[in-house]
Amino acid sequence: MSAQIVNPSNEEELVDYVKAAQSPFAIAGGQTKSAPDADVAVSSSEIKGIDVYEPGALTLVAKAGTPIEDIEATLASEGQRLAFEPGDMRGLLKTKGTPTLGGVMASNASGPRRIQTGAARDHLLGVRFVDGLGNVIENGGRVMKNVTGYDLVKLLAGSRGTLGFLTRLSLKVLPVPETSLTLRIEAPNAEIGVKVLSAALGSPYDVTGAAWVGGESFVRIEGFEGSVNYRANRLESELGQFGDVSKHQTENIWRNIRDAEPFHKIEGDVWRISVKPSDGPKVLSALPGQGFLDWGGGLVWVCVPPKTDVRGILDQITGHATLIRGQGHGPTLNPATSDTKIILNGIRHKFDPRSVFSAPQAVNP
Amino acid sequence: MEMPKPSRFVLSKKDQIVAALLAVLPEDAVISDPMETQAYECDALTAYRCPPMVAVLPRTTQEVSEVLKICHAEGVPVVPRGSGTSLAGGALPTADAVILGVSRMNKVLETDYENRFIRVQSGRTNLSVSGAVEDEDFFYAPDPSSQLACAIAGNIAMNSGGAHCLKYGVTTNNLMGVTMVLMDGTIIEIGGAHLDAPDLDLLGVVCGSEGQLGVVTEATLRILAKPEGARPVLIGFDSNAVAGACVADIIKAGVLPVAIEFMDRPIIEICENFAKAGYPQCEALLIVEVEGSEEEIQDQLDRISQIAKSHNPVELRQSSSDAESAAIWLGRKSAFGAVGQVADYMCLDGTIPVSELPAVLKGIEDLSEKYGLRVGNVFHAGDGNMHPLIMFDANKPGDLELCEAMGADILRLCVAHGGCLTGEHGVGIEKRDLMTDQYSEIDLEAQMAIKDVFDPKWLLNPAKVFPLSVSQDRREVRS
């Protein structure tokens, strides 16, 4: 079903639309995810632009519809970046569109560096959003440390358009390091792979990527050149006990992991599963299909036959599974326990009492 | 400071409530003698005091749940308390409240080096979390100055920071999961040894909610491998503005120090008199600390020194040994004690964009003149977390009120410059009435809606965070 797209040209028009809405609508950012399952989608694409950028304070404030590539280009001109490495799912989902800041934050999209620098939510300093009644609400600000009142910023990050329509966001940005080096360590199976990654992550060498793909573990170090060489050499000698180690100056492998590139050309449901790192290999061996590990083993990407009951199979393992591509078993997000569900539903009801934000993919049954 | 009137109805039921608590807790865990409850009359914000009706010291999550069920049924307000080190009055009781202290819940429940986490009961002190993993060369990163005494429960309630959070983040960035008891006694688990939330980020909103959403009894915390070493450099400048510009340049250059501390002239003088750390007498001092191997440290210190030299420092002293590092830190670490020797003081923690440092420092100086009270500034400059210390004389009638009025003006100044009221101490009662300076009524309504969901009767940690006038309707529903 293709939805009618509404493009408010600013926040005021958006507020008017929300206040007048008589039936549910989906919130669309750059439309890089699957088509919304609603008659109408309201897009943030016209609510865009960078309002403030202070390189010396490591902060940027931009409107929600600002394309991520615009933000990255602006940051790059000052040698800075979004450190949490948001992914680009267009290749996996066969969609077009443009990833936006609002979309990235509403889905708390974080890539391989999440283990070292934190998730998207950890880089979000402030939000401005429109709730389901059309109220414009602000929380947080544009400073690094802020404990003034409840942290609704974290709550909005990853709320997938169910609590509010994000209109403006303040971010913490970080310098691009001088250089980056990736170590490849032979690791024939996932268990050995995670042992290698745990050894690297348990070292003082500030690893910024730790993945296992296709019989090899990958460990990334970033920083000033002398420091990177020093740490790479130390890790090379410490990880040598597990298998042959080689060093590479490439970011491609991390982009491929971030965007689930191994699954772009194969059919099947794609799931993203967050578990304790040492449980990663168990998840891989319990499920059919193909998979690889990011976040030191704690993030399992799998491509399984359509409608595989992934959550049922993983019943005994603590964590959560999100369906990224396909028509799998049950809801997209992991269902909550009954006590937590009361809270989740209670919060959604408070922010959207008329249920105008239709986000079927996110809602628990 | 206005506090809600205690409920006479609750007070009249004291004996019955104590009996009910004694039925679910051991005798030594229920404190109801007014001589003894007095020990809980305040936290580190000692200007405000009020003994609670009862204090309880449970040892398990189950006991916490039993206590909360009783209080919920009887409509008794509950004030959770970690170690009582809040500078914002976050654990100030009301006369009709039960203080729920978690100090006896201090066990380590699980350490897992392979997966890099530790699970502890929430009464465990911050420093002893690191202590539990230091033999394996790991540590827990958030390091509030009170870390020897403060409890993880309080760190979570206030989303505490510390000097090293420039690199490692604050509590919310290092907290992976909690076991929490809701006001009605329901025990819920949020997060755990895995990363990120399956749905809404409840952990994110619980952290920093000042004990108003639930009582956190257990926490899963991220632990990190200790760096190989750390050393600071001390840099003196002849103006605050130049020191501020130097901070911005260091950050822009891509060096990410673990800490950038800033002291202004009044603090430098007081610290030097007290600690004899050999600080130069100048307008502003920076202490910048970096971590890594010996070569990495030297490389970063050289880069920082290079940047500093372009700002014509009056002093530049790289530490080259542990003894020299200790000397550089000595003055800074004794700052609060040193100020305490010369005057009573009030410590604020407004946070501002780093670029606004010079303007805000000038504004504070003007306010100091206007009010006739001395102010010293010592703070985490890398993230703009100010700590103005207003000095006053508690024995002089009217001085405390003058100091509070000036503190409020300083915080308003921070907000006006794009900052916030509190960076790491929390709102508590101290900044409660200033919340409307930072947030609109609609903004506050959205925050209070969260409390409505977790604690519909508004019994947990009453009269904190939200101005009484703003929360009045909700609190009245209770009584």
Image (cartoon, coloured by chain):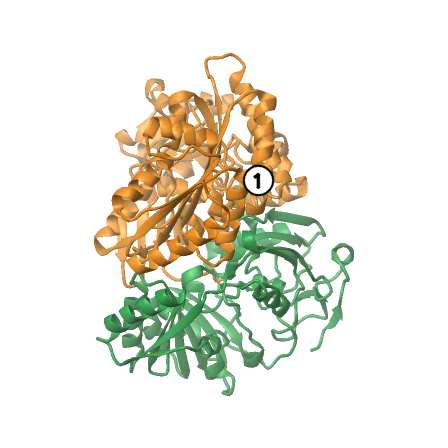
Chain colours: A green, B orange
Vertical order, A166 against B245 (above or below) = below
Vertical order, B446 against B176 (above or below) = above
Vertical order, A141 against A3 (above or below) = above
Name the kind of residue labelled 1 in the image: Pro
Vertical order, B200 against B155 (above or below) = below
Query: Quadrant of the image for the C terminus of chain A?
Result: bottom right
State the image coordinates of residue A332 (x, y, percent, origin top left). 53, 70
Please, what secondary structure does the residue beneath circle 1 have? helix
State the image coordinates of residue A218 (x, y, percent, origin top left). 36, 75
Q: Is residue A251 visible?
A: yes
Residue A34, image quadrant: bottom right
> Residue at (77%, 54%) from the top-left corner?
A12
Q: Nearer the viewer, residue B158 or B453?
A: B158
Q: Nearer the viewer, residue A109 or A180?
A: A180
Q: Nearer the viewer, residue B218 or A210?
A: A210
Q: Is residue A306 visible?
A: no
Residue B88 appears left or right of A163: left
State the image coordinates of residue B181 (x, y, percent, origin top left). 41, 45
Residue B68 appears left or right of A175: left
Residue picked out by circle 1: B358
- Count neighbours of disc 1 (C-alpha within 10 A) and say few if under 14, some if 14 to 19, many if 20 or more: some
State the image coordinates of residue B12 (x, y, percent, origin top left). 46, 21
Residue A235 appears left or right of B192: left
> Residue at (52%, 74%) from the top-left corner?
A324
> Residue at (58%, 62%) from the top-left corner?
A106
Q: Nearer the viewer, residue B76 or B108?
A: B108
Chain identifier of the residue bearing label 1 in the image:
B
Query: Quadrant of the image for the N terminus of chain A?
Result: bottom right
How many numbered discs?
A: 1
